Amino acid sequence: MKLSTRPRPWLPPTSGFAGFRFPPDVIVVAVRWYLRFNLSYRDVEELLVERGIEVDHVSVYRWVQRFTP
């Protein structure tokens, strides 16, 4: 079996937000609120629900873990 030696075509880098259910704007706002105002994940969840975005506090936790150093 011989492997192809053709070079792969260049692909643009994918977004760090690729694969998430919510738009990047929602994720960025949630992480910003959590960090800036020292809120709990449940507090951020409630603030988003008040604005018509139903998200679980565990999702906010995962966003903070993924998008903060």
Image (cartoon, rainbow, N blue to C red):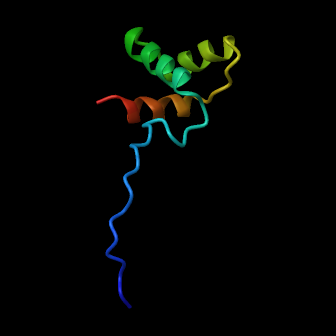
Q: Position of residue 33 (x, y in %)?
A: 46, 13
In the picture as drawn, the residue positioned furthest to the bottom comes out as: 1
In the picture as drawn, the residue positioned furthest to the left comes out as: 69
Residue 6 in the figure: left or right of residue 41: left
Q: Position of residue 29 (x, y in %)?
A: 49, 16
Quadrant of the image occupied by residue 38: top left
Using the image as rendered, state which of residue 69 and residue 9 is in the foreground: 9
Q: Position of residue 37 (x, y in %)?
A: 42, 8
Quadrant of the image occupied by residue 4: bottom left
How many labels, in total? 0
Residue 15 in the figure: left or right of residue 43: left
Vertical placement of 10 versus 58: above or below?
A: below
Residue visible at 54% across and 43% down in the picture? 19
| Quadrant position of the N terminus in the picture | bottom left
Residue visible at 52% across and 26% down in the picture? 24
Q: Position of residue 36 (x, y in %)?
A: 38, 10
Using the image as rendered, state which of residue 58 and residue 67 is in the foreground: 67
| Quadrant position of the C terminus in the picture | top left
Residue 63 in the figure: left or right of residue 42: left
Vertical placement of 43 versus 68: above or below?
A: above
Residue visible at 42% across and 37% down in the picture? 16
In the picture as drawn, the residue positioned furthest to the right comes out as: 52
Vertical placement of 25 versus 19: above or below?
A: above
Vertical placement of 20 versus 24: above or below?
A: below
In the picture as drawn, the residue positioned furthest to the top comes out as: 37
